[in-house]
């Protein structure tokens, strides 16, 4: 989409704003690596799955010092999982171990 396309989209969906505001937003998103500019068009730099994985890694690193064990322990402290989910998690973690 172009900057004008974004501006039209926001204004037609109840988020009235100036073009300069949209341009600032697009510039910041490009600087952070979320968008790629190609001429006058902007494209996503990541698929949803790639973005989710990147975000999860950032949370893991920032909040749990990169430790998946600390994350699971924190999650498990307030939440319960079923035996089936526990088995699936165990199988997943064993699969990660095999990749090393």
Image: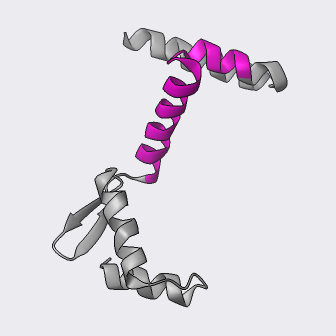
In this image, 17 relative to 40: left or right?
A: right
33 sits to left or right of 16: left
Magenta-tinted stretch? 48-74
Give the percent coordinates (x, y) of residue 90.
63, 15
Give the answer, above or below, for where 2 lies relative to 43.
Answer: below
Q: Position of residue 58 (x, y in %)?
A: 48, 33
Query: Residue at (38%, 83%) from the top-left corner?
Result: 19
| Residue located 47% across and 31% down the image | 57
Quarter placement of the C terminus: top left
Establish if 36 lies above or below 40. Answer: above
Residue 99 image-quadrant placement: top left
Position of residue 41 in the picture relative to residue 73 (left or right): left
Residue 45, image x and y in percent? 31, 54
Query: Could you tell me if residue 6 is visible in this image?
Result: yes
Front-most of 93 and 20?
Answer: 20
Q: Nearer the viewer, residue 82 or 75?
A: 75
The colour scheme of the drawn protein is one colour
Picture residue at 63% right of the left edge, 14% below the top: 70
Q: Quadrant of the N terminus?
A: bottom left
Can see residue 80?
A: no
């Amino acid at each position: 989409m172009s900057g004008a396309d974004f501006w039209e989209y926001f204004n037609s969906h109840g988020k009235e704003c100036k073009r300069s505001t949209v341009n600032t937003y697009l510039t910041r998103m490009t600087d952070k690596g979320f968008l790629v500019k190609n001429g006058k068009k902007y494209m996503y730099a990541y698929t949803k799955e790639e973005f989710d994985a990147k975000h999860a890694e950032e949370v893991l690193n920032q909040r749990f010092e990169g430790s998946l064990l600390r994350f699971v322990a924190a999650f498990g402290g307030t939440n319960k999982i079923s035996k089936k989910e526990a088995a699936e998690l165990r199988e997943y973690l064993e699969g990660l171990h095999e990749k090393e």
